[in-house]
Amino acid sequence: MLDIQGLSKLYPVSDGESAPMRALRGWARHQPRPAPKLHAVDDVSFTIGTGESVGLVGESGCGKSTLVSLITRLIEPSAGTILFEGKDIAAINTRAFARTPERGAIQVVFQDPHDSLNPRHSAFDAIAEPLRRLKKRSTAECRPRVAELARDVGFPEELLDRLPHQLSGGQKARVNIARALAPEPRLLVLDEPTSALDVSVQAVILKLLDDLRTRLGISYLFVSHDLNVVRLLCDRVIVMYLGRIVETGTAEQVFEQAAHPYTRALISAIPRTIEESPVERIHLPGDPRSPVNPDPNVCRFYGRCPRGVDLCQESEPRLLSMAPEHSAACHFAEEVQESALAQG
């Protein structure tokens, strides 16, 4: 369904030097100095199959939200292709994309169920808005579909006339999900959809999302910091670090046979119950490298990696296939994987 190849998003940043001075400096040295750019997403490639749920994980600043904005065509890419059912939607500018059929086929459930609803729109209006704009339906024509969507997500129909401030957090989350499902999408992007909810409500909403995927057969790109949730709901997992994919594989491969030191550190931080076997926490010293004009010859994880050696600052590792569907970007991926297996 979705085939992303070489996708990048680079943002120009100011280096504090005026354009004339930069040009003069470049002329004096007989070579222009490249303008600094922040590599938010850098040469990312992956696929999502029909009906598949893919998890996207990584710490804040790794490029997850930027990648979501690129896939949903809210921002323009710097390079790369986004093939949705064979059509390169990256070649369509964001303004024109809003008028294409693919706009309704790719929908988002945003992170904050409170701020993502218009405070002046009732629950009915929030769910009906995509039908009015994308399906060109009148309010009267929307009513049966909105009622059906409310039932699908477990939202009481008698509350459809209420404003967001009159709803609980879980009810607002259901309205957000119903709104995203209104135009009958084939790909649903879930950007931390439960992070702002109470733990008890999170479990209910996650169960709802799992049921909807099974029932409707839609694909999910599930962005989350909670690895336990990703393990529960996703078929495959993508791990990002500083704009790059550092590991990808099935949920079982990534969680049981992690082959990248960063993935192992993330997994070691998962909270465990008393009944579960304890796992030694892997601490990552230092700070992440700068994403501004990163050195193409240095591993992005160098400086925090427990294994970092001279090779890591001389040659940036590319994704190495460990097994079918399982790849990791580390010079020592096989050794890391063996260590993970040895420790259970």
Image: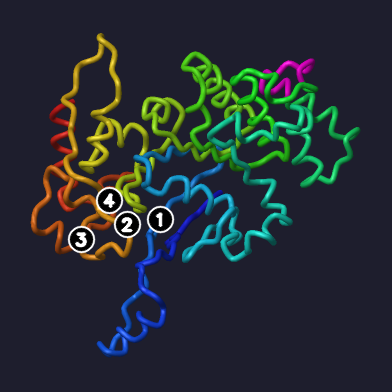
Q: Earlier along the polypeptide chain: callout 2 or callout 1? A: 1
- Asked if disc 2 and disc 1 are in contact, CB closer than 8 Å, the reply is yes
Q: Earlier along the polypeptide chain: callout 3 or callout 1? A: 1
Question: Which residue is at 43% across, 61% downward?
Answer: 8
Question: Which residue is at 41% across, 49% downward?
Answer: 63
Residue that label 3 marks: 298
Q: Amino acid at mark 3?
A: Val
Question: Which residue is at 63% across, 64% downward?
Answer: 92
Residue that label 1 marks: 40
Residue that label 2 marks: 291
Q: Earlier along the polypeptide chain: callout 4 or callout 2? A: 2
Residue 50 place in picture, x, y as percent: 56, 42
Q: Is residue 117 above or below residue 321?
A: above
Q: Main secondary structure of the magenta part?
A: helix
Q: Earlier along the polypeptide chain: callout 3 or callout 2? A: 2
Residue that label 4 marks: 321
Q: Quadrant of residue 27?
A: bottom left
Real-space CA distance between mark 1 and mark 4, rounded to the nearest whole angstrom: 24 Å
